[in-house]
Amino acid sequence: MTANYREQIPAGFAPDSRVWVYQSSRLLMLSEALHVEDLLNNFIANWNSHGAPVKGYGNLFFGQFIVLMADERATGVSGCSTDSSVRLIKQIEELFKVNMFDRQMLAFMVKDKVQMLPLPQLQYAIDNNFLSADTLYFNNLVQTKEELENNWLIPIKESWLAKRVTLGV
């Protein structure tokens, strides 16, 4: 399940295409996920920057992560076009009563399921063997297509979290 997400990233985008990852506070139900995908498709079809169409991509991964991508080699993304994407995410928050902007909530892949954990509980989870240095972490700080492909789902020991906790070896 974990590696499959790479297959859904379009090949026709430059490696330095800008990426934004928004993490939902909960797994979306199937009906909600289908609605989100419709909203994303509609947004991408109409995404503009100063009147020029943005070469964009949007998808829902693992039923919980919205990934937006813009290939700026085609059209640069301006503040207004970025604002329009944020409005879309806020609309999704309101529609489905989820939080998409909580950067203190971390996501991990545990037994092929996305598990959420507040940042202040990370050390406790490691100390009690709920998570280990090799547990896969969703690094939502990725900023490019290349980072999304190679550094989005990485072991805790290879992420910025390794500096925040004491990892058992």
Image: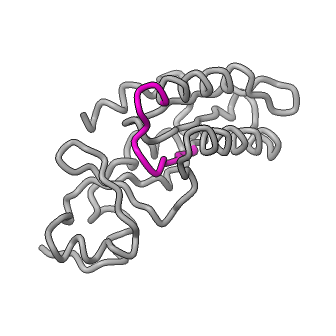
Q: Give the quarter of the figure containing the C terminus.
A: bottom left
Residue furthest right in the image: 50
Residue 19: image location, x then y, percent: 57, 42
Position of 111 compared to 4: left or right?
Answer: left
- Is 72 one of the magenta-colored residues? no
Please tell me which residue is depicted at 36% across the width and 25% down the height of the picture: 7
Q: Up-down: is 7 above or below 145?
A: above
Q: Quick one: 144 or 46, which is closer to the camera? A: 46
- Colour scheme of the picture: one colour
Residue 146: image location, x then y, percent: 46, 41
Q: Quick one: 30 or 2, which is closer to the camera? A: 30
Picture quadrant where residue 76 is located: top right
Please tell me which residue is depicted at 62% across the width and 26% down the height of the picture: 39
Position of 72 compared to 31: left or right?
Answer: right
Position of 69 compared to 73: left or right?
Answer: left
Q: Give the quarter of the figure containing the N terminus.
A: top left
Residue furthest bottom in the image: 166
Residue 136: image location, x then y, percent: 27, 53
Which portion, as a residue range, is magenta?
20-32
Picture quadrant where residue 157 is located: bottom left
Please tell me which residue is depicted at 77% across the width and 23% down the height of the picture: 53
Please tell me which residue is depicted at 87% across the width and 26% down the height of the picture: 51
Q: How many labels does the image show?
A: 0
Picture quadrant where residue 84 is located: top right
Q: Up-down: is 122 above or below 20?
A: below
Position of 101 compared to 152: left or right?
Answer: right
Residue 150: image location, x then y, percent: 37, 44
